[in-house]
Amino acid sequence: MFAERVGHLALQQLDAAGRWALFGTRAIRHVGAGGALGARLARAIFELGVRCVPVIVIVSAFAGLVLGLQGHYVLSRFGASGMLGTLVSLSLCRELGPVLAALMIAGQAGTALAAELGIQRSTEQIDAIELLDVCPEGFLAGARMLSSLFVFPALTSLFVIVGIAGGWLSGCVLMPQDPDAYWSAVHSAIKGRDVFECLLKAGVFGLLTTALCAYQGFYAHRSGEVGARAVGVATVRGIVLSSIAILVADYLITAILL
Amino acid sequence: MKSPQLERIVGLFLLGGMLSIGYFALKMGSVNLVAVETYTLEARFSNASGLIDGSQVAVAGVPIGSVTGMKLAKDFSAVVQMRLQKEFHLPSDSTASIRGHGLLGDKYVSITPGAADDFLSNGSRITDTESSVDLESLLSRFAFGSVQSDKKQPVKE
């Protein structure tokens, strides 16, 4: 009895994973479905990118500020204050930048995406698109997934730059560190491969987040709830699964590239 | 939603995004888009511990290249491959040594130019080398030595 239930659950999850992968590939392949790709891309960049700029700036500034303080506290214990720039820039560039930026964008734009598609599903707009012989995955999710490949790396770069400036503010202005040593440590610490890893992570997180959130909204009617509740469930699953996917993918990419 | 204002904001975002990626990659990450002409050299060390791919190669403290690979030779010495900027011609009797940026810092290859008239060409090998100083064995030798000299002293009651 128990084994049967476990097996059933496992098969269900396997189906969901397969459906998600099919959803993603269909969305990218039929990205031009329904026309007006340029306008949809612009709108996607506005929703995913422009709207997230304030939250990215605030979060990155405080992440950098606290890194500067903690770094100063830890490093000055063993007389390595000159390494503050190395610590702040490498941790922001390799880990915190891509992960925190992706989590913030998922929270701000991913939830909106899941809710929007969920409502379109529950009001049968998606069925209407299908009746028009337009691929709904491509029409609704394609442009968003494509634009995430630019938006996530761009916002991650912004995150790293503002964060490093925040580390300078707390380490060198509020705390007695030497700014010249800080900046030269920053410039010598970040290598080409760090930048590559950072931007690669950002792009992967972007695709994962948009595909997961769009998928949850798109298949809101399969969540076991109906109507408004289904939209709620889809939104929650979108953000939770995106967050998990971001952290798991982060570990995997780091382990492969290191 | 579709208004000229939206397009302008998105355009601004595209410009700003590209600028920040560019600044991050080119200014902070010092990624070279223009390929610098390079040539490769090899150096043989009895001990190359602490060097990794990407370690700096410097002349007089100024970085002019990086380590691209390491392998173990048949006689169990370490052969380190380096890529240097083409504009710097090194005399054929130059010496290479492995140095560190302080106790905690990274190891790098320091090349001291010689005085010969001919230059090291692409693929040639520097044989006159000085290996990395193994600080731990140095310390333990020192500690071990000092323990012995302590023992020689007569114990006073």
Image (spheres, rainbow, N blue to C red):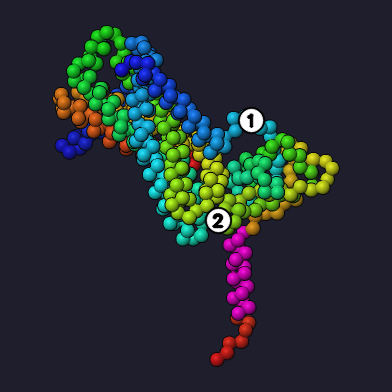
Q: Position of residue A114 (x, y in %)?
A: 26, 26
- Report whether residue A54 is seen: yes
Q: Quadrant of the C terminus of chain B?
A: bottom right
Q: Residue at x 47, y 46 (%)?
A: A168
Q: Position of residue A246 (x, y in %)?
A: 36, 36
Q: Residue at x 46, y 40 (%)?
A: A93
Three-letter amino acid code at disc 1?
Ala
Three-letter amino acid code at disc 2?
Leu
**Residue B154 is one of the magenta-drawn residues:** no
Please provide the residue range marked out in magenta: B134-150
Kindly state the secondary structure of the residue where label 1 is placed: loop
Side of B18 relative to A230 (left or right): right
Q: Residue at x 49, y 29 (%)?
A: B19
Side of B90 relative to A190 (left or right): right
- For label 2, the crowd category at 10 Å Cα-Cα, with few meaning under 14, some 14 to 19 and many 20 or more, is few
Check chain identity for marks 2 and 1: say if they share one.
Answer: yes
The residue that disc 2 covers is: B104
- For label 1, the crowd category at 10 Å Cα-Cα, with few meaning under 14, some 14 to 19 and many 20 or more, is few
Q: Is residue A143 above or below residue B48?
A: above
**Residue B147 is one of the magenta-drawn residues:** yes
**Looking at this view, is B7 or B112 the one in front?**
B7
Q: Residue at x 38, y 44 (%)?
A: A62
**Looking at this view, is A42 or B151 the one in front?**
A42
Side of A50 relative to B94 (left or right): left
Side of B88 relative to A224 (left or right): right
The image quadrant of residue A155 is top left
Q: Chain of mark 1?
A: B
Q: Residue furthest right?
A: B117
Kindly state the secondary structure of the residue where label 2 is placed: loop
Q: Quadrant of the N terminus of chain B?
A: top left
The residue that disc 1 covers is: B35
Q: Chain of mark 2?
A: B
